[in-house]
Image (spheres, rainbow, N blue to C red):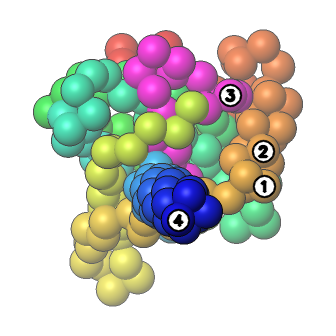
Amino acid sequence: MFRTRTLMAFLLVAMVVGLVLTGSGTAWAQNQSDVFWVAYYSGGVTSAGAAAGTDVQIINTGTSGGNLCADVYVFDVHQELKECCHCNITPDGLLTLTMAQLTNNPANGVFSTNGVIKIVSDSGSNCNEVSPVPTPELRSWIVNPQNNGTITESEFEATPLSAQELNDLKVLCSGVPNLSGPGVCARTNPACD
């Protein structure tokens, strides 16, 4: 009888531990798809100081309970990182970044009118595009001009953030010298320091 009770207790503990581990793994996987967004852009600037008529809108839904940062990575059509930066967003806050702010300061001096923008939702206490601490709950939209003269607004695509992608973004952005000068986006936006 002692063995039966011990065995039953052991099995019960093992089952509870298994459920806890499975549940936390599921939550982690879900969070990883709620911290990283990707969209294409068109209408980037062709020279320094040029205006572009499109915007990126980013909101902090407020459910995290505090400030969040949008770590922004701008790539050209050749998958080369052009610019990176971070911008602070308060709970229930809206951040508007113009395409000019995102594309007018390329690291290599070569402007790109088309490419990809990636955003990592970062902890507000961290706010570091070279070493993000992925924290859920930003939402993003982009307005793009189309060839037929119309404009479209699209939501950034939620994409699972792999450890490899996160590491690649860190390494690429850390190549921007001192995170100042060429390669730093949105320097004129007060939310992006």
Residue ID at (57%, 31%): 133
Q: Is residue 158 magenta?
A: no
- Kindly identify the amino acid type of the residue bearing the numbered disc 2: Asn
Identify the element where label 4 is drawn.
Answer: loop
Gap in angstroms between the C-alphas marked 4 and 1:
52 Å
Classify residue 138 by image quadrant. top left
- Provide the residue designation for mark 4: 1
Residue ID at (52%, 39%): 134
Identify the element where label 3 is drawn.
Answer: loop
Identify the element where label 2 is drawn.
Answer: helix
Residue ID at (68%, 58%): 162
Classify residue 60 by image quadrant. top left
Q: Which mark is residue 164?
A: 1
Residue 61 x/y as whole percent: 20, 41
From which residue to which does the magenta span run?
Answer: 118-132
Left or right: 11 as drawn, with respect to 107: left
Classed neighbour count for the residue bearing mark 4: other residues with Cα under 10 Å, few (<14), some (14–19), many (≥20):
few
Choose the circle earlier in sequence order: 3 or 4: 4
Identify the element where label 1 is drawn.
Answer: helix
Identify whether 188 is placed above or below 148: above
Q: Which mark is residue 131?
A: 3
- Provide the residue designation for mark 2: 167
